[in-house]
Image (cartoon, rainbow, N blue to C red):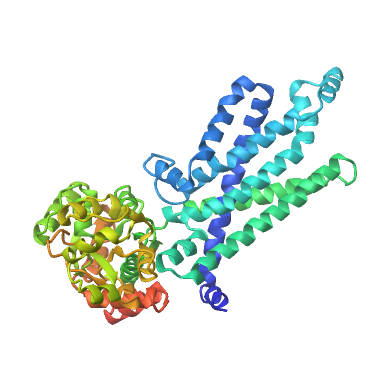
Amino acid sequence: MRLLEFWHGHAAEFGALLVQHLFLVSVSTAAAIAAGVPLGVLAARRPRLGAPSVWLANVAQTVPSLAMFGFLLPLPLIGGLGARVAITVLIVYALLPVLRTTVAGIRSVDPALVEAGTALGMTPVQVLRQVELPLALPAIVAGIRVAAVVGVGTATIAAAVGAGGLGEYIFRGLAMVDSTMILAGAIPSAVLALAIDGGLTLVERHVRLVLTGRAAVPDRRVVVAAVALVAILAAAAAAIAAIRPSVVRVGSKNFTEQIILGEIVAQAVESAGLRVERRLNLGGTFIADRALRAGEIDVYVEYSGTAYTAVLKQAPETDSRRVLESVRRAYGDAGLAVLAPLGFENTFAILVRGEDARRLHLRTISDVVPHAGQWRAGFGYEFLQRADGYPGLARTYGLRLAAPPRAMDLSLVYRALAQKQIDLAAGDATSGLIDAYDLTMLVDDRHYFPPYDATIVARRSALLAHPRLKPVLDSLSGRISIAEMRRMNHAVDAARRDAADVAREFAGRLGLAPR
């Protein structure tokens, strides 16, 4: 019931994401067919020449899809955020099934038929076109079917790099631990994959019947018209995707607070009469920062300590003013503007269960040290790697755990701690799940963590291109308190409210209702 209500309430957004998903899959599969069939023919007829392409396709297939996106992000032309890099990755994964089935199909043709065609005076091209390809067509269609189904599944991951599609709901649901939102993206993806698989299975079966003389060959005009329609639709979708009106592209990282802040910034910009393209839920710090520097987004909210230690690779510093000034200078050299803080700080929160804190009288991180030898910890991926993360924390406090910390998505650590799967976690100080799960935030008594003032970072070229942008962004400075941020996070994480609605209410209170 909740799922149906969600689809009904987000009908326009759902339709747009479905179209994006279909666009990614159709364009990548078509490109894989255009490249894979000729390469397969070459590999079947000239094994020495075609073997490298088969080998490369096999190697690419072994690379995890998330890692593939990471490899391609920094590359020129095919890298960056959005549909471009997503289509590139999908082509890579779709290429192998098409390539291998083409090779198998061509090699399965009876040599006697090829010899007969040659004896009748056919050229090699004519033999290929009139004998080998028609007989290999069922196998090729089977490969296309596999490639398309794989593409539907892999395209859900493309949402992590701002390419849209049904994966948007899955990633949002994971960030907010909302099973309804996860299912809102997962179920249509599964249905789409089954529909494509069923449709292409029927095509494959019909091709086999035609080749055995048990079905009529479709009228050539019908086939040409169908191909032309698909080509026109693909060209139209590509043209629409290529048209970029003058918009401000607002990004965010992939957890609840960032999505809320991204919506607040987007709605504030819209209140100034500017058009906004939302690229929320992009991924971690480094993806968002890279997107900003590459011009894929124009503005997002960063935290001063994160920028100082994780992005600029500086040793942790506790003076908030010095940190902010250092970040401003370094970002300014890169053509980025760091605006005044929004009004709250979101430091790392070292968390234990409330019942353990009361029973063991735990108040500070130092109080945990005597018990850590029997405890299990769970941390987000970034916290395990960052200069201001777990390695430095363990050194500063002499923290020795029973086992190496478990790496998990930041959105899951709160539930894992509450369900006693772990005993110690690192979360966000502003998370609404701290109160919802009765967790206790320990005091950083040795002042290990640097300041993490939330502040808007924007590309200077975007501020110059849109004169109304900086004044509206400045109007948010100092307007969001830590209590207000925690209430908004709680509304999304615990009360399961939509982040856009929560942000809209807050923007309305500030007098920033979108036009």
Q: How many marks?
A: 0
262 with respect to 323 (left or right): right
**Residue 334 x %, y %:** 22, 47
The answer to whether 308 appears left or right of 413 in the picture is left
Give the quadrant of residue 493. bottom left
* Left or right: where 309 falls relative to 109: left
Q: Please give the name of the residue rendered at 19% of the width and 57% of the height, measured from the top-left corner.
A: 305
Question: Compared to 302, does 216 lie above or below?
Answer: above
In this view of the protein, which residue sits in the foreground, 103 or 352? 352
Residue 327 versus residue 276: which sits nearer the camera?
327
Q: Quadrant of the N terminus?
A: bottom right
Q: Give the vertical position of 452 relative to 224 (above or below).
A: below
Q: Residue 144: percent from the left, percent from the top?
A: 66, 44
In the displayed structure, 125 sits above or below 148; it is above
Asked whether, in this view, residue 70 is left or right of residue 343, the answer is: right
Residue at 16 percent of width and 63 percent of height: 366
- Can residue 184 be seen here? The reply is yes
**Quadrant of the rendered image containing residue 413:** bottom left
Q: Position of residue 205 (x, y in %)?
A: 80, 47
Instruction: Give me the residue at 35% from left, 75% from top.
Output: 437
